[in-house]
Image: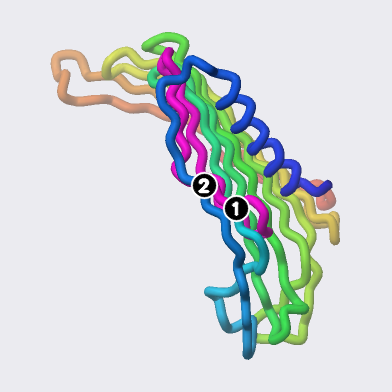
Amino acid sequence: MNHAKQVTILMCLLLVVVASGQVTAETTRGTIRAGYVFTDHEGNRSMDQTAYNMYEGLALSIENFRHDFDRGWRLKADLENITLENRNLRLGIGKSGLFDLTLTHRANRRIYDFSDDVRTRRHVTNTTFWLQPHDMIRVFGGLAYTTKTGDQAPLISPTDINQVDYDHTHFHAGVRLQDQRRYFQAEYRGADFGDNTENISDRQSSRVRLIAGAPVPSFERLVLSLGFQHYEHRLERQEDTLMAN
């Protein structure tokens, strides 16, 4: 089972389990749409950008779903084309002022030739969250995972076909402390790119960022802000590292 299908099944199961497990929920609303998509393409597929990501088959969607619980928690979902390869999914659960977790996934296709023999597919999965245990403290973070596979051809040389197969991971985490107009935030961001065709392109990056601000004494309308960041970009095969502050 590939990554895209795993994410789709997981999001649907979370939606069913959470919604059905709370019998004290106040309200539930949303729209379920089902149909069949027929396609009939003529001509050069690579020139019709509007049809790049169109698939034929049974289409099932859950739109504008919202489930409100009696203690202020909410579950929201927009699951478009669950059963097709151009799915666009969004699922979130949270409570105002306390917590929020959002999971998204989308799939895209790009066609490069007349008959749809040369194409690439991209899957992007993203998770973000924040937690506010105190009025002055907020913890946040996220993780994104992108894969792209297939064959692509440049517009200036359509016969020069290149194989594409890579995965790209982004992640970040941080904390923000704030008391009225005084604040401090620390955040770490990292990325890892893996080229499965030529490892020479593998690389990683990291960034540490600190910012702080406070009103100027005797001039409360003026806010003084300070910041610092450190960035590193590493190429594994070349054993080369770029650093900047």
Q: Nearer the viewer, residue 205 or 119?
A: 119
Q: For the view shown, which residue lies furthest in the top direction?
A: 134
Q: Which image quadrant is residue 224 in?
A: top left
Left or right relative to 17: residue 166: right
Q: Amino acid at mark 1?
A: Leu
The image shows residue 87, relative to residue 226, as above or below, that is below
Q: Which image quadrant is residue 145 in?
A: top right
Q: Which residue appears at 65% of the width and 67% of the height?
A: 55
Q: Which residue appears at 52% of the width and 52% of the height?
A: 33
Q: Which residue appears at 62% of the width and 76% of the height?
A: 39
Q: Which residue appears at 54% of the width and 28% of the height?
A: 101
Left or right relative to 6: residue 212: left
Left or right relative to 146: residue 228: left
Label 2 and label 1: CA atoms lie apart by 8 Å
Q: Which residues are magenta?
A: 60-87
Residue 21 at x, y = what percent?
60, 20
Task: Label 2: state its secondary structure.
Answer: strand
Residue 12 at x, y = what percent?
64, 38
Q: Nearer the viewer, residue 43 or 133?
A: 43
Q: Which mark is residue 22?
A: none
Q: Which image quadrant is residue 7 in?
A: top right
Are the two marked residues, 2 and 1, in contact with CB atoms closer than 8 angstroms?
Answer: yes
Q: Is residue 83 magenta?
A: yes
Q: Is residue 66 magenta?
A: yes
Q: Nearer the viewer, residue 187 or 227?
A: 187
Residue named by callout 1:
60
Residue named by callout 2:
32
